[in-house]
Amino acid sequence: MKVVVRVDGTAQIGLGHVMRCLTLANQFLPLARVTFLSCPLPFALHQQVEQAGITLLTAPPLNSSEQSTRSDCQLDEQAQYKHANQCIDVLSRAHNNSIDILIIDHYQLSSAFSTAMRRCSKHIVVIDDLANRQHDCDVLLDQNLYDNYEVRYEQLVPSHCHKLLGPKFAILRDEFYSSSVIPRKDNHFLICFGGSDPSNLTERVVDTLLSLKSLTISADIVVGAGYTHTDSLKTKVSSLANVTLHVACSYIAQLMKTASTMIGAGGSMHWERAASGVAGMIITLADNQIETTRCLHKQQCCLWIGKSDDVTQEDISEAINFAISSPEKMRKLADNAASLISSNKNPSFVVDTILNSIKR
């Protein structure tokens, strides 16, 4: 079986799409040959994809609107048709025969791209969370929680499309399914805002920790391959007792399972926190993280501190103090979140569901 994934990731637009596709690709690998068709990736992430045994092809550049800071800006139909034809040319040189499954995780591409790509792919799977455009696909996967999550794609996909909706279909790495043998530490924080953290919220939280030196807390700080302020961060972390910096680590699940509270972004990390049983205090980095985070906050599955542009150091300080003074409430947040993904019990769950949906 041949699987191709069309996805992009940069320090500017974030690496979350690539990371969740990499997780899904790893779960396909025992069954399929997997190829990523993407823009040039940061070096460390490029290596991670290739070391997983995935073929990495450079996607043709999108038109000039790709340079926009709006990574969710859908391309017009003509541009999508052109891009599809260019992608087919690239794939035809790498794959003599048609591919079996094309997975698309890209806010700028919609049904126009998918329809054109059916010339070379038997089945199409779309991963989305915006529900703001038409899709031509056989399977639509949206792992997020919204007030209307069960019906929001009703008018956006073909009648034959199988919709895999909600946190039960969260794409989780194998490490999140293993039990932890390390006890959770009281007043131990984990701070992580994804692979690139373009707003540098990590350093803002560390600045808050510096102002709270009198508190008896410990912390792990995690930054990814796309983070560009590592030297400055190292200097600040070095002056904090019981705080450790981890750069591009491969064991974040272990860190989540030992923390009592995690301060981080929305997106896929919501479900990683839920699987790890750690309470989340969330600062949303992008508009597409807001609705799910608001819904989870309302259902007492996390604490939403606010949007990155609005959150102050005082807000972060108050959140940290709340976590320390209210351990029972934080435990309740973690337990409520864990209940949302309780049926997702093994690493092959999402892939098995996709394949079963296609066979029907």
Image (tube, rainbow, N blue to C red):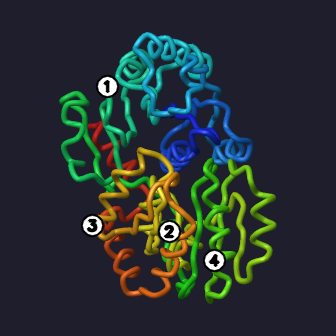
Q: Amino acid at mark 4?
A: Ala
**Observer-nearest residue: 346 or 259?**
259
How far is mark 2 from mark 1, CA to CA?
43 Å
Q: Amino acid at mark 2?
A: Asp
Q: Nearer the viewer, mark 1 or mark 4?
A: 4
- Tag 1 near tag 4, CB within 8 Å: no
How far is mark 2 from mark 3, CA to CA?
21 Å
**Residue beneath disc 3:** 299
SS under mark 2: helix
* 162 in relation to 329, above or below: above
- Which mark identifies residue 315? 2
How far is mark 3 from mark 4, CA to CA?
27 Å
**Residue beneath disc 4:** 219
Q: First in sequence: mark 2 or mark 1? A: 1
Q: Quadrant of residue 87?
A: top right
Q: First in sequence: mark 3 or mark 4? A: 4
Q: Is residue 34 left or right of residue 149?
A: right
Q: First in sequence: mark 1 or mark 4? A: 1
Q: First in sequence: mark 3 or mark 1? A: 1
In the rendered image, the quadrant that contains the C terminus is top left
Q: Residue at x 79, y 60 (%)?
A: 232
Image x and y of residue 67, in percent: 60, 25
How far is mark 3 from mark 1, CA to CA?
33 Å
